[in-house]
Image (cartoon, rainbow, N blue to C red):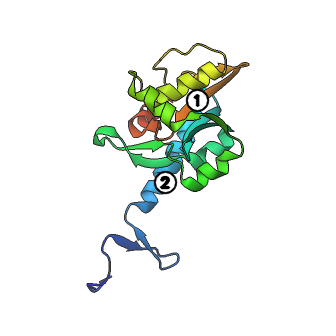
Amino acid sequence: MFIPYNKDVNRNKLLNPLNNSRVELGETMNTDLLKTMSKIYQAKSACHKYILGFTFKGVVYAVVIGSDDIAQFMKLDKASRGKGYSLRFKPTVAQKMSLLKDSQAICSVEFFDETVATCIYNRGEIFEKFVTELNGQTWEKDNLPFWKGPDLEVDGIGYQLKFEGATYMTESQMYKLMEEA
């Protein structure tokens, strides 16, 4: 079928035949990739409880959520070094506000940032350290992948810890895990 050229049509959008709306190129693919990566992450994760860390109005908070709720806090983003996509914890302001009622304040953002600036660890590692120590345990840095074990165990329950901006899983890790299945 021939479609006549129309200079007013954004060529970066395609017509959705279901409702005649226009969608961004790649939007459907990205939505499918997000769903696929989310499902694989949850299926392969060594634990199904999460402690998420975020900042809000000058305070660092932590909240415990289960695997039923984790998908809503996953966003598809470009992976580091331009190698595909990554699944990240990037909560919106509205999401942070919804988490506040079940959250625990950890420290001020000022103290948190000073700690990060004066040590060799990144924000995610410092968050892990603070949460681990708040649970009466000694923190040690490890590089244990999410599919091999938890970041923290409390009363026999394993938790993955993620601070805002953290990567849950990269696209390359997803393909590696799919090959192993």
Which quarter of the rendered picture does the N terminus lie within?
bottom left
Q: Give the image location of residue 13, x and y in percent.
A: 36, 71
Residue drawn at (66%, 45%) of the image: 69
Classify mark 2: residues with Cα within 10 Å, few (<14), some (14-19) or many (20+). few
Vertical relation: 169 (above or below) 46:
below
Q: CA distance from mark 1 to mark 2?
A: 24 Å
Q: Quadrant of residue 83?
A: top left
Residue 180 appears in the picture as rendered: no
The residue to which callout 2 is attached is 32
Q: Position of residue 122 (x, y in %)?
A: 42, 28
Residue 81 disc label = none
- Could you tell me the amino acid type at mark 2? Asp
Q: Is residue 15 placed above or below 63 in the rendered structure?
A: below
Q: Position of residue 56 (x, y in %)?
A: 56, 46
Residue name at image x 49 percent, y 20 percent: 144
Q: Is residue 177 left or right of residue 44?
A: left
The three-letter code of the residue at mark 1 reads Gln
10 Å neighbourhood of mark 1: few (<14), some, or many (≥20)? many
Instruction: Give coordinates of residue 125: x percent, y percent.
Output: 48, 26
In this rendering, is residue 68 above or below 133? Answer: below
Q: Are marks 1 and 2 in contact (CB under 8 Å)?
A: no
Disc 1: which residue: 160
The residue drawn where x is 47% and y is 17% is 142
Task: Identify which residue, 154 or 121, lies in the foreground.
Answer: 121
Of residues 5 and 111, the one nearer the viewer is 111
The numbered mark, 1 or 2, whose residue comes first in the sequence reads: 2
Front disc: 1 or 2? 1
11 relative to 120, above or below:
below
Residue 102 falls in which quadrant of the image? top right
The residue positioned farthest toward the right in the image shown: 155
Observer able to see residue 161: yes
